[in-house]
């Protein structure tokens, strides 16, 4: 079971930019908590943050670059900062997708 949880953690990616980032964070946090509670395996915030930044889709590249720049300059970046920025970006991606779908529907109707 421990190896399964570790594998699940390492393989976990947000995938599509339109996927709800809250669900992904919840999954990661659950796996990390299970590893710690059940097996004493600690994944600290820095490791979790590195995993999150490395496993975001390309649509989040600007956020990743900004957060990495903050980290490299010695600023403290925590998981809540990443969640907030990612959720805002996800909202913008969904709004852009909705607009594109509306435009396609208008074109299909000939209007």
Image: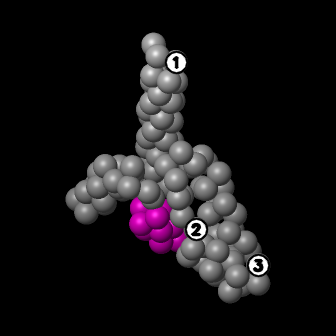
Which segment is the magenta one?
Answer: 43-55
Q: What residue would you read off at disc 3?
A: 38
* Label 1 vs 3, first from the N-terminus: 3
Per the image, label 1 sits on a secondary structure element best described as: helix
Q: Nearer the viewer, residue 54 or 50?
A: 54
Q: Main secondary structure of the magenta part?
A: helix
Q: CA distance from mark 3 to mark 2?
A: 20 Å
Q: Nearer the viewer, residue 33 or 92?
A: 92
**Corner quadrant of residue 65:** bottom left
Residue 99, percent across and down?
46, 26
Residue 83, percent across and down?
51, 48
Q: What residue would you read off at disc 2?
A: 12
Does the magenta segment cover residue 45?
yes
Q: What residue would you read off at disc 1?
A: 109
Residue 89, percent across and down?
44, 40
Q: Residues within 10 Å of mark 1 (few under 14, many from 20)?
A: few
Would residue 111 be found to the left or right of residue 1 on screen? Answer: left
Q: Nearer the viewer, residue 18 or 3?
A: 18
Q: Residues within 10 Å of mark 2 (few under 14, many from 20)?
A: some
Q: Give the numbered dot on residue 83.
A: none
């Amino acid at each position: 079971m421990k190896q399964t949880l570790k594998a699940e953690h390492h393989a976990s990616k947000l995938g599509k930019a339109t996927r709800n980032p809250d669900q992904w964070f919840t999954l990661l946090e659950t796996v990390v908590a299970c590893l710690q509670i059940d097996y004493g395996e600690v994944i600290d915030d820095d490791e979790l943050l590195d995993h999150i930044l490395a496993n975001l889709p390309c649509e989040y590249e600007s956020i990743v670059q900004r957060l990495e720049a903050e980290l490299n300059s010695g600023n403290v970046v925590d998981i809540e900062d990443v969640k907030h920025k990612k959720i805002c970006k996800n909202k913008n991606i969904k709004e852009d997708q909705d607009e594109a779908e509306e435009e396609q529907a208008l074109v299909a109707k000939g209007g």
